[in-house]
Amino acid sequence: MKFLDQAKIYIRSGNGGAGSVSFRREKFIPNGGPDGGDGGKGGDIWVEAADGLNTLIDYRYQQHFKAQTGHHGQGRQMHGGKGEDIVLRVPVGTQVLDEDKETVLLDMDRAGKRVKLLAGGNGGWGNTRFKGPVNQAPTHANPGQEGQERWIWLRLKLIADIGLAGLPNAGKSTFLSAVSAAKPKVADYPFTTLVPNLGVVDLSSTERFVIADIPGLIEGASEGAGLGTRFLGHVERSASLIHLIDGTQDDVVDAYRIIRGELEAYGDGLAEKAEILALNKIDSLSEEERIEKADALEAAAGRRPMLVSGVSGEGVTELLRAAYAEVRKLRGDRHVVAEEEDDTVFETPGGWSPM
């Protein structure tokens, strides 16, 4: 399935149904009077975070979503039914943004969260509503209220506890495949990973967390070089970053500084996240090379890197334990409150219409 993490869509709630103009005409009831029913309410537009979805591909081939118009009223005071709602099912972690692609309207950060985006128009009154001592035979009814409309952006940010960062060919995909059941593409050339991959790590029956592998960054990524920083948003929610550095390259310090520079240029708190520094591919290094490169990284980063190999498994368990310690810190600080279904409606500014 193609990975899609951004989509622009048009949504419109349903118009209210029109009220009815009707009079009783039974044979044995003279002067029957008005009996027109009210129109039904237009359908609403909802957004719901659903488990089992991990891409916005459903919104690649359909961009317009219009709820049903309310049914019109009829004679004998029969009121019209409500128009059918539309529910936009999105992956957990999806943000709903305004048309400017900057203003965040909603953050669908937990499964089952359901919010009303646009309310349908109210149904019009039938002529029964207008009868009175002065006007005993009203001949008019109200039309239904117009629905609301707007353009919105959907932007997916994957829910992961730990993010993998590093240059292309740092061994991130190999590491992910070694510690989880994920099967990312692994090859001996740069930019093997083109889209984010998720893997679930099971340390024990009660110790489980999710790792996200994003495409590698290169120098100038914040200015659009390579794949740019487009996918860094998928690790914004993580508790910590595992910074993997290819131990087989000549200058490991330069590799470290490149990634740190790109994280700082991206912003959004990524550079301030707890970072676990790891020298990868140590199965290809001699004991002297391991010490030499670990010392160089310690001098540059101010802390000793962990030594790991995704191929041989050396040091992997210790690294995962350190990562899970960061996850527990985040989970301990997070206060989860059960919420009822949210009926919040985002009103469309008066006079606004889509381009």
Image (cartoon, grey):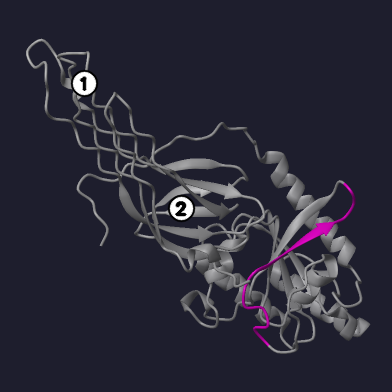
Picture quarter containing residue 343? Answer: top left
Q: Is residue 194 magenta?
A: yes
Q: Residue furthest left?
A: 134
Q: Identify the residue position indicated by label 2 in the image.
A: 96
Amino acid under disc 1: Arg
The span from disc 1 to disc 2 (Cα, nearest Å) is: 40 Å
Residue 281 higher or lower than 233, as above or below: below
Direction from residue 295 to residue 217 in the image, left or right: left
- Which secondary structure type mostly characterizes the magenta part of the structure? loop
Mark number, residue 182: none
Q: Which residue is mark 1?
A: 129
Q: Amino acid at mark 2?
A: Val
- Please tell me which residue is depicted at 59% across the width and 58% down the height of the picture: 236
Closer-to-camera residue (92/42): 42
Residue range corresponding to the magenta coloring: 190-205
Q: Is residue 82 above or below residue 26?
A: below
Residue at (19% x, 16% y) in the render: 32
